[in-house]
Every structure is written in structure tokens, then in C-alpha cells.
Image (spheres, coloured by chain):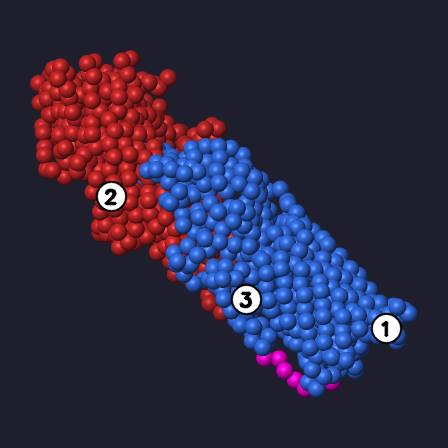
């Protein structure tokens, strides 16, 4: 470990005005003078987002079982003479069977019974509790003898509950008896038992009658007009919901005929408590994707579990869909046609459905943001006022003043929307928030004067430009610039379509449609600067130096060849992360000498200056501990006799600087 | 660590003592290294273990005290720098070697004719040739050379650290003219660090006000890489061969040794870097125009700037280091009647700044204690001349201790003398 004395140049460089200012804002003129050209987008107004809101079109439907029906059904049951004979037994029954095919008189018969006949009514339902419904009983006497005192009972096989109990006094051979039973409030099984108990016949009254044991007493039951409290049955296919309608947007003035959707979705929220699949179909025939396919959503809601429900909550994105807003008729506006169907599709499966079961459906379009719109955008008055901050052009100027010789500001409205309008600039104020200075624009040709705004055109898309040229001749624009504004305050009115639907529904906006307000600044760099103070900060990088303690005291010398007609004083402040000043190096006094203007009022020979500063060991360590360095440069223009007080800046002006150091350093090999 | 090692070695040179079998074992060298032929001649145990460490540094112009301060981290004040500066010559050299190792050897077969030797050694070598201006730049800085041109041409530096995984086979040749022993060895080399700088032309002019430096240079710098040196980080590989011959006269009055070791190279091929420059330029500081105009987000690496302004070419070509080969011959005459030995020898390390080191040794055996004490005088090597001691102690028939130094002057009067050396070796035999 030992000390060495180092004498070396450290850094050097040459800064011209082209180096100091970005190429994008400098314009070199033919005489090599420099003009500052600067564009700031003061306002970017999204007409669609600010003025057009597409309402949600949500439809809610609730369907319960009380609107469900079972189809009418008919079943028949036959009791043959042979079956009756068998039930009669010997001797009468045996006689009838033995007489089959012959003509013979039949004696009066009493105490006949059909026995219990099972009726399979499961084609109606497995079981049902009916709120309403009727059962027609038709009894056809196919026997060759009359029947009397017929007591017909139909009851559930499961619990013997009587469904039908009819007494018929007499039915002649070949005649029909008809009765109707009200089923309201009854619980009916699909498996029934029919029984004609204890009926009689007066016989053939001594007349020969043809005995045919296949002759039958036919009972036909027809159930109809059934509505249910609950049923276990095979339900027929049927629509639960069938909405076909035009949806009308209330836009409050604009009349749109076509919309391309930037974002948004169809929502489908379904709650199903029915133990059967629900088939959903939703169509918007007038909404097509870029490939020409219309919206058609088909989905199946699964059956609900017993005493439970199934919820379907889905969204279907609509990005890129183009929607015809002229409705089903094609001559409306703000309207689209849609169809929603929810149905049970008969599957042949037996399911249980109660009156308490239901299906709740919520569907529609929501959060629709248009990307493109066509139609008539209506008449709208828009007032905008705001303060625009962060104007970057002058943000490094801390204090001091300049007097400009010339400058032009163009306020440009770039209208990307296919609408006409009139704009009125009510107020424009330049504001330096650091100093508090505010200057209002005074421009009689523009302030509070309606100016037509050019509309955009489609196919091809062409932006309409409207320009407000503010010059020293028609305004106090230089006063606004010379306060070094970092903010602008504006108030303006825009009247949309002041002459109504002039373009016959051809107003439009598309994805690129914005209304931008640009500030185009052109300032020839010819000015008087009085203590113009520029401040900037950089990461010092010094904190990353290893073994900083090995760098000791030293003398640092700055050699400068100044080709600018400005005096300059430089001060370096070394800061920590929280902007506390750790150390300062002041080279401001005496200032760096300005380049002298020659007879042509140009600097051709740079002026040489040399400034040295001694850095003590303590100060050195504070500098090396700094995270940031803040450079403050103070400029004063220096004119010459025969030249304007305002000096002009040329592109070949440059400041060459070099920093050398004579310092002690401890070499530490790390033993 | 290095301080500790040196202290141990130094203490060993003055602390060894014992009282065992009187027998004369001639000293082998002024530097300690493993000589299979010598051991085959004088160690008869079936299994022999041997360990050693040897440190040597010297310069033809830098006092030992200056080197010690440089190596071990104390602050070098101006007085010490001034004293060293007074000693500078037109051509200055300095060198440093630190070697250590552990060996195992055993007979092959039932006879004692052949013996197999296996060893692992750590070797560290540094060599430097420099001009007075380079010394001044390095230790005073360039401020004192303002408005002057510093000439550092023909300066060089080479350094290497490597492990040698060694094997050797030795054989005895009993003849009427005495007992000969010969050994050949081969080594696999694991390169841990290698650097080489050759400055063919180096002129640096410093402007009086420091506003510029004029550089005129032609140099090549090779480095294995800049990462830390550790055993698990192999940066190069190589091989080496050795040859040893020893002889003992029939009357045991004459003894002679010849050694040619480390005949090999290391190829640094894993992560090599080569910088070359052959140019002249004026350095007026790093141009930070771009940095300033790009704003605070701009960043540029120091290495990139250096490359840009010194106009260095760099590549990743592998490079080769020729090992500092050791060449030694010595002869000892022993007068048993007076228990006195006289030795003469020459030791050299080729491919280094080492000059052939000629030495004379006079020793006295102390039979009662099994001790043999020697005084050594030498001239050459990395420095100029040296004066040292050697203590050789037998403990029983199978244990030998040897500690010594070819030059103690650098320890005794570090500001007046230029070399310092110390070594220690222990040999232990077993007959299982």
C-alpha cells in the first residue's frame, strides 16, 4: 500500500447546440442559425370515449313449471268374455267357455267381477300431482248381453288411492258409457289398477246369442288438460323462452346505423332447478365477425340435481364484430334484432319436475365499446377546460430570463372524426408553476371567435386539420414563451354538427379517430439571456467506485474553449439519494468567458478560460459518496458593438471542455 | 497466511535440534524441492513420506524490506521508496517463488532397485523486469514526471500459479565407481492462474498541466482470466518432465546431484484474454459528450472506455506459459575424520529473470546429535548475493528434518540486502 500522485486528464468533450438539443427539436437554417422546432400534444381527445356510451342491453326472464304441460294421452284396457267366464268358474263360467262359437241363451248372471286389471299409464307419467286435468272413461260393452250395476274403480297400484269410482246402472250390448273425472288435486300413479266389481247381467232373456269368448268390455281412459304440481314423467319438447325482438339503444341524440365493437361481451347467466337439460340458443343475425359469421350461441344447461340447481355464467367476447344497427326492418337506427330461445328437448328420459322448479335467464350485451361507428352523431356542445402539465421544453430552466426576437406558435386541431364542428378558444394561459408567472394569450382573431373545424374523411381515412397561427404580429405569443411555461391552461367549446345531419348518416369514427390539439413551436435561437439558469441532474456513478477511500485530495482544473456568445458560470452540487447536498464545487465566479462576436456578429474564435479548484480529502470523500450530481449553469448573453443586443445561435458554435486532475491516490494491493 | 508461513519457516531454521544416530547425509540444494534420486540414495525405508515448503524472493535493486512491505501490506512511505529508488539500475529485475508439496514413495518389488514416487505440489512464480521510470510511475505516480517522457520499454512481468500432480520412478545402480541413482518424472499440471506482460515499447509523456498524456506503446498482455485463484477453478492444463541423477562415491566422500525439473508448458485455454497494443495516441480525457447529451440514463463501462482510448485489441486466443525450469548441479566432499563437508553448486531457473545462482557450502557434522550444520554463501538468483544457514537433523534412521535459507540477509538487514529465502523439509520413513 502506497500513495502515488496522478496527473492526468479525466474527461473532455465538445458540446454544440446540436449536441445539447435533440435532433428532433432543432432545425438548422440556411445561414447556419438554429431554430427550435418543438411539438407538444396538448390534448388528445377520444371522441368516442368521451361522448359515446353504449348502454347495456340486459334481458331477464323467469320461467316456472306452472307454464309446463303434459301432453294429452289415451290408453285402453279390455276385459274379454273369456276372462269373465274364468272368473265365474263352474258351472256358469264353464258353460260359457264350452259354448264358445255356438248360439245359445245365457241365463241371468249376478256377482260378476272383472278381477283386478293392471293399467299401465306410465306413458302419461310415472307419478303426478295434478293442479288441473281430466280423465275421460269410456266403457264399451262388447258382450252379447247387457250389463247392469257396474261398479268401475280405478286406483293407484301403490297406495290403492281411488282415482275413479263410477257406477253404471245398465249398458246394452254394443253400447258405450262415457264419464269424465276431474283429476285436480289428485296424485296419480303411472301404474293403476282397474276393477269392475260386482256387476250383473239379466242374460239374453232366453234368446240365443252367439257366444264368443273374445268379446270384450273395452275401457278407454283419456287424460287431458293436465297442469301439474309435480310430475315424474317424460316431458315433451317445448320452448320455455322464445324472445324475438329488436333491441333499441337510447343514445340521446346520435343515430347510429353501424357499429364495430372494440370490446364488450354477451353475458349469459342461467339458473336451472329443473331436472332436465335446458337448450339455449341466442342469435344476433345482424352482428357478423370479420369472416361474415353472425352471432349464434348454442349451449346446453345440464339438468339440476334433486332439490338443487345448476348455474351457468358465461361471457362471449364481441371484439371485432360489426353490428347492423338498422334493426330487423333495415330502416331503423340504434337498433339490433336478436333471438333468444330456451327449451326442453324431449329425450325420452323420465324426469321429476315440480311446480317450484324454474329457470332464470339473464342475457344480453354489456360493456360495449365501439371501435367504429357510422350514422349521424347528432348535435352536441362540448366544453373542455383543463390545465396541461409537464411541458418539457423549458423544464431545465430554473430561473433567469430571455427576450426573444421572434417566434411562432401554431395551435393545430387534428380531427380524426368524421363530424363537422365549430371550435371557440375561450382562454389560453401560459403558466410557470415554479415562479407563479401566468400570461393569458391575447389574439383578437382567435380568442372567443368560432372557427370551423375540418372533418375527417373515410376511404381513405384522412384527418382534417385546422390551424391557428399565433405570431408576434397577431398575438402576444412571445410573452407566453418567455415565462418558460411548464403548464398551459385552456378553455374551449366545440359545437358538433351545427348544421345537423348534413352528411345523411355518413358521420363516422374509427380506431384511429381522435381529436388532437398540437402546439407547434418555432423559436429562432436569437435572444437576450439574463442569468438564464439551467439545472440538470445525473446519476454520479461515483458511489460505485471501489476503494473510494484510496482517492485523496487533489486539484482539478477545467480548461474551456467557449464558442458561444454567452458567459457561463457552473456549479456542481453532489447529492445523496434524498437530494441532500453533500458537497458543492462552485466554478461560477468568475464566469467562463463568452466568445466574442466579430464584425459579422458571429463567434469565430472561442474564448479560453481555465478554472481550478482544490478538493480536500474530506470534500473528496463527500463527493465520492454522492449518488447524484446536479449541474447548474448560468448564462448571460454578451453582445458587441454594432450587433443587436439579442445574439443569434449558430449550429457551428461549440464549447470544448477538458477536466484534468492532479490528485493523490493510495494503491492498495489488498494484502 | 504468507506471513505465518514465513515465520514458521524462519523459526525452523534456528530451532531444529536432536540427538540421534550420527550419519552424514549431504545437503542437496540451496532450494528445497523433491529429488527422487537423492531420496532413493539416502532414505532406505520401505515407505517414505516427504513434505517441503520453499520461499525465495529477490531483486537486483529492490531491498528485501521494500519487497516485504509490498508483499505483506504495510504502508510504503516515501523514505522507503526513496531508499529503493536510489538502488535502481538501468535494468531491474525481481522474482518470487513459493513452492510446497507432499510426496509418497515406496519400493517396487522385493529388491530395493526401483522406487515409485507420487506427489502433489503447489507452485507460484512471479518475475518482473522494469525500468526506473516504471518504478517511479508505479510508486510515485506520474505527477513527478510532468513535462517528461517516462520510458518503460522492455519491461515485462510473468506470473503463474499451478498444481503439479507428479510421479517419478527411480533406480539404484551399484557400480565399482560408486552408487548411482537415477530418476525420471512426469507431471500433469493444473493451471490456476497465468499472466504475461511484454512491453516492447512504452513511452508516456505527461503534459505539464496534465491536460494530456502522449502514449507510444507496443505491448502484449495475456491473462488466464481475472477470476479468483482457487483449486477448483482450472484455467489451463499442461505436462512436464523431470530428470534426476545422484552419485555417492565408494568411500562415501564424494557426493553429487544433478536435477533438471519442470521441463514443460501450461496451455491457458479455458478463459484466456489477450490484449495487444501497438500505437501512439494522445489521451485528453474520456469524451463524455455522448454521456452528457444522452441524459442521466446513459452509462458506459470503464473497460469499454479504456479499450476505446488506449486502442487495445483484445481476443480470446489461448496462450502458453513455459514453466520456470530448474537446472541444478552440486557436488559435496565429505571429510569424515573432521566431520566436515564442503559443497559447491549452481542452481538456475530458466525462462525467468533468475540468473544462475552459484553457491558454496561448508558444513560440520555433529555425530552425537545427528546434526549437520552448514553455512551457505551464494551469488546470483533473483538478487545479488546471499548468506545463509542450513540445519539437517536425523532423528533415528527414518526421520530427517531440514531447515535453512540461502539468504538470511534480507531478514536481518532488509533495507540493505536484496534477497531472502527460507525452506523446510521433513522426511519420514516407515517399514510396515
Q: Position of residue A61 (x, y in %)?
A: 34, 46
- Badge 2 sits on which subunit? A
Q: Nearer the viewer, residue A292 or A333?
A: A292
Could you say which quadrant of the image residue A47 lies in?
A: top left
Do the numbered discs 1 and 2 sit on residues whose CB atoms are within 8 Å? no
Q: CA distance from mark 1 to mark 3?
A: 37 Å
Is residue B244 depicted above or below B322 in this figure?
below
- Where residue B191 appears, as percent x and y from the top left, is 64, 55
Number of other residues with Cα within 10 Å of mark 3, as a class: few under 14, some 14 to 19, many 20 or more: many
Chain for numbered disc 3: B
Figure quadrant of the N terminus of chain A: bottom left
Q: Position of residue A54 (x, y in %)?
A: 29, 35
Q: Is residue A393 visible?
A: yes
- Residue B250 is tagged as 1
Residue plotted at (38% across, 54% down):
A3
The residue stretch that appears in magenta: B15-21
Q: Residues within 10 Å of mark 2 (few under 14, many from 20)?
A: some
Q: Earlier in the sequence, mark 1 or mark 3?
A: 1
Could you say whether the residue bearing mark 1 is in a helix, strand or loop? loop
Q: Which chain is blue?
A: B
Give the label, 1 or 2, closer to the camera.
Answer: 1
Q: What chain letter is assigned to the residue under label 1?
A: B
The residue at the point 72 percent across, 60 percent down is B328
Q: List the residue tagged with mark 3.
A: B409
Considering the numbered disc 2 on the image, is that residue within a helix, a strand or a loop?
A: strand
| Letter of the red chain | A
Q: Position of residue B170 (x, y in %)?
A: 82, 66
Q: Are marks 1 and 3 on the same chain?
A: yes
Residue picked out by circle 2: A613
Amino acid at each position: 500500500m502506497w500513495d502515488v500522485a496522478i496527473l492526468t486528464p479525466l474527461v473532455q468533450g465538445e458540446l454544440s447546440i446540436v449536441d445539447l438539443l435533440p435532433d428532433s427539436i432543432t432545425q438548422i437554417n440556411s445561414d447556419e442559425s438554429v431554430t427550435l422546432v418543438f411539438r407538444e400534444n396538448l390534448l388528445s381527445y377520444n371522441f368516442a370515449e368521451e361522448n359515446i356510451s353504449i348502454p347495456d342491453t340486459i334481458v331477464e326472464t323467469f320461467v316456472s313449471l306452472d307454464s309446463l304441460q303434459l301432453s294429452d294421452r289415451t290408453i285402453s284396457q279390455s276385459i274379454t268374455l273369456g276372462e269373465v267366464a274364468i272368473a265365474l268358474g263352474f258351472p256358469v263360467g264353464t258353460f260359457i267357455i264350452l259354448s264358445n262359437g255356438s248360439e245359445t241363451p245365457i241365463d241371468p248372471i249376478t256377482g260378476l267381477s272383472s278381477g283386478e286389471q293392471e293399467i299401465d299409464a306410465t306413458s302419461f307419467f310415472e307419478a303426478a300431482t295434478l293442479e288441473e286435468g281430466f280423465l275421460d272413461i269410456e266403457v264399451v260393452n262388447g258382450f252379447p248381453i247387457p250389463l247392469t250395476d257396474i261398479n268401475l274403480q280405478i286406483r293407484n297400484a301403490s297406495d290403492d288411492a281411488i282415482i275413479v269410482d263410477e257406477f253404471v246402472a245398465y249398458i246394452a250390448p254394443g253400447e258405450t258409457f262415457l264419464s269424465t273425472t276431474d283429476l285436480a288435486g289428485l296424485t296419480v300413479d303411472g301404474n293403476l289398477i282397474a276393477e269392475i266389481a260386482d256387476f250383473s247381467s239379466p242374460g239374453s232373456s232366453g234368446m240365443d246369442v252367439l257366444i264368443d269368448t273374445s268379446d270384450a268390455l273395452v275401457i278407454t281412459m283419456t287424460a287431458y288438460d293436465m297442469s301439474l304440481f309435480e310430475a315424474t314423467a317424460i316431458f315433451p319438447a317445448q320452448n320455455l323462452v322464445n324472445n324475438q325482438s329488436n333491441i333499441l339503444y337510447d343514445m340521446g341524440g346520435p343515430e347510429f346505423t353501424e357499429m364495430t365493437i372494440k370490446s364488450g361481451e354477451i353475458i349469459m347467466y342461467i339458473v336451472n332447478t329443473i331436472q332436465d337439460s335446458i337448450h339455449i340458443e341466442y342469435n344476433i343475425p345482424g352482428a357478423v365477425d370479420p369472416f361474415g359469421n353472425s352471432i349464434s350461441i348454442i349451449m346446453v344447461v345440464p339438468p339440476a340435481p334433486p332439490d338443487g340447481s345448476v348455474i351457468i355464467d358465461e361471457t362471449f367476447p364481441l371484439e371485432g364484430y360489426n353490428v347492423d344497427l338498422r334493426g330487423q326492418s333495415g330502416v331503423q337506427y340504434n337498433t339490433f334484432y336478436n333471438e333468444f330461445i330456451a327449451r326442453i328437448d324431449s329425450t325420452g328420459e323420465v324426469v321429476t319436475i315440480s311446480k317450484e322448479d324454474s329457470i332464470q335467464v339473464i342475457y344480453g350485451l354489456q360493456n360495449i365499446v365501439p371501435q367504429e361507428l357510422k350514422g349521424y352523431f347528432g348535435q352536441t356542445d362540448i366544453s373542455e377546460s383543463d390545465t396541461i402539465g409537464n411541458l418539457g421544453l423549458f423544464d431545465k430552466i430554473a430561473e433567469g430570463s430571455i427576450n426573444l426576437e421572434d417566434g411562432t406558435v401554431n395551435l393545430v386541431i387534428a380531427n380524426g372524426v368524421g363530424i363537422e364542428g365549430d371550435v371557440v378558444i375561450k382562454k389560453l394561459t401560459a403558466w410557470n408553476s415554479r415562479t407563479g408567472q401566468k400570461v393569458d394569450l391575447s389574439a383578437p382573431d382567435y380568442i372567443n371567435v368560432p372557427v370551423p373545424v375540418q372533418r375527417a374523411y373515410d376511404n381513405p381515412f384522412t384527418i382534417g386539420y385546422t390551424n391557428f397561427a399565433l405570431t408576434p404580429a397577431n398575438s402576444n405569443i412571445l410573452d407566453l414563451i418567455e415565462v418558460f411555461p411548464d403548464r398551459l391552461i385552456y378553455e374551449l367549446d366545440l359545437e358538433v354538427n351545427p348544421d345537423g345531419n348534413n352528411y345523411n348518416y355518413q358521420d363516422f369514427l374509427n380506431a384511429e379517430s381522435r381529436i388532437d390539439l398540437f402546439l407547434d413551436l418555432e423559436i429562432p435561437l436569437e435572444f437576450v439571456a439574463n442569468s438564464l439558469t439551467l439545472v440538470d441532474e445525473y446519476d454520479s456513478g461515483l458511489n460505485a467506485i471501489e476503494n473510494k477511500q484510496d482517492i485523496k485530495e487533489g486539484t482539478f482544473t477545467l480548461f474551456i474553449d467557449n464558442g458561444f456568445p454567452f458567459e457561463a458560470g457552473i456549479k456542481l452540487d453532489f447529492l445523496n439519494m434524498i437530494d441532500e447536498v453533500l458537497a458543492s464545487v462552485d466554478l461560477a465566479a468568475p464566469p467562463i468567458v463568452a466568445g466574442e462576436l466579430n464584425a459579422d456578429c458571429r463567434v469565430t474564435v472561442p474564448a479560453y478560460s481555465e478554472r481550478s479548484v482544490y478538493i480536500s480529502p474530506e470534500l473528496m470523500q463527500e463527493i465520492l459518496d454522492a449518488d447524484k450530481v446536479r449541474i447548474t449553469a448560468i448564462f448571460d448573453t454578451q453582445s458587441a458593438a454594432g450587433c443587436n443586443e439579442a445574439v443569434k445561435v449558430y449550429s457551428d458554435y461549440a464549447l470544448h471542455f477538458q477536466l484534468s486532475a492532479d490528485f493523490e491516490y493510495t494503491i492498495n494491493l489488498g494484502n | 497466511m504468507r506471513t505465518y508461513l514465513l515465520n514458521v519457516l524462519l523459526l525452523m531454521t534456528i530451532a531444529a535440534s536432536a540427538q540421534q544416530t550420527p550419519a552424514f547425509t549431504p545437503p542437496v540444494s540451496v532450494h528445497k524441492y523433491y529429488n527422487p534420486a537423492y531420496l532413493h540414495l539416502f532414505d532406505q525405508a520401505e515407505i517414505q513420506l516427504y513434505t517441503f515448503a520453499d520461499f525465495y524472493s529477490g531483486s537486483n535493486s529492490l531491498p528485501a524490506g521494500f519487497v516485504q512491505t509490498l508483499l505483506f501490506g504495510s504502508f510504503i512511505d516515501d523514505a522507503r521508496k526513496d531508499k529503493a529508488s536510489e538502488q535502481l539500475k538501468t535494468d531491474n529485475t525481481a522474482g518470487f517463488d513459493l513452492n510446497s508439496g507432499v510426496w509418497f514413495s515406496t519400493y517396487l518389488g522385493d529388491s530395493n532397485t526401483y522406487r515409485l514416487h507420487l506427489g502433489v505440489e503447489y507452485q507460484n512464480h512471479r518475475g518482473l523486469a522494469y525500468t526506473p521510470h516504471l518504478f517511479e510511475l508505479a510508486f510515485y505516480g506520474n505527477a513527478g514526471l510532468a513535462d517528461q517522457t517516462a520510458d518503460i520499454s522492455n519491461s515485462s512481468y510473468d506470473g503463474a500459479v499451478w498444481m503439479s500432480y507428479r510421479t517419478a520412478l527411480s533406480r539404484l545402480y551399484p557400480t565399482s565407481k560408486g552408487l548411482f541413482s537415477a530418476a525420471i518424472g512426469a507431471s500433469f499440471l493444473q493451471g490456476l492462474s497465468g499472466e504475461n506482460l511484454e512491453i516492447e515499447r512504452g513511452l508516456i509523456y505527461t503534459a505539464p498541466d496534465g491536460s494530456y498524456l502522449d502514449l507510444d506503446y507496443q505491448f502484449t498482455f495475456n491473462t488466464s482470466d481475472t477470476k479468483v485463484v482457487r483449486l477448483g477453478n482450472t484455467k489451463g492444463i499442461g505436462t512436464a518432465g523431470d530428470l534426476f541423477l545422484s552419485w555417492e562415491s565408494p568411500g562415501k566422500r564424494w557426493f553429487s546431484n544433478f536435477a533438471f525439473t519442470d521441463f514443460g508448458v501450461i496451455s491457458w485455454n479455458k478463459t484466456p484474454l489477450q490484449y495487444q497494443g501497438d500505437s501512439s495516441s494522445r489521451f485528453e480525457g474520456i469524451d463524455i459528450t455522448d454521456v452528457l447529451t444522452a441524459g442521466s440514463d446513459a452509462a458506459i463501462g470503464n473497460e469499454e472506455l479504456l479499450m476505446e482510448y488506449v486502442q487495445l485489441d483484445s481476443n480470446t486466443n489461448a496462450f502458453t506459459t513455459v514453466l520456470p525450469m530448474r537446472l541444478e548441479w552440486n557436488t559435496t566432499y565429505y571429510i569424515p575424520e573432521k566431520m566436515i563437508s564442503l559443497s559447491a553448486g549452481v542452481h538456475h531457473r530458466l525462462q525467468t529473470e533468475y540468473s544462475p545462482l552459484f553457491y558454496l557450502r561448508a558444513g560440520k557434522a555433529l555425530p552425537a546429535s545427528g546434526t549437520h550444520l552448514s553455512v551457505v554463501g551464494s551469488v546470483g538468483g533473483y538478487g545479488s548475493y546471499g548468506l545463509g544457514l542450513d540445519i539437517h537433523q536425523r532423528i533415528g534412521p527414518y526421520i530427517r528434518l531440514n531447515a535453512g535459507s540461502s539468504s538470511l540477509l534480507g531478514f536481518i538487514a532488509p533495507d540493505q540486502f536484496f534477497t531472502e529465502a527460507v525452506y523446510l523439509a521433513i522426511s519420514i520413513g516407515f517399514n510396515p
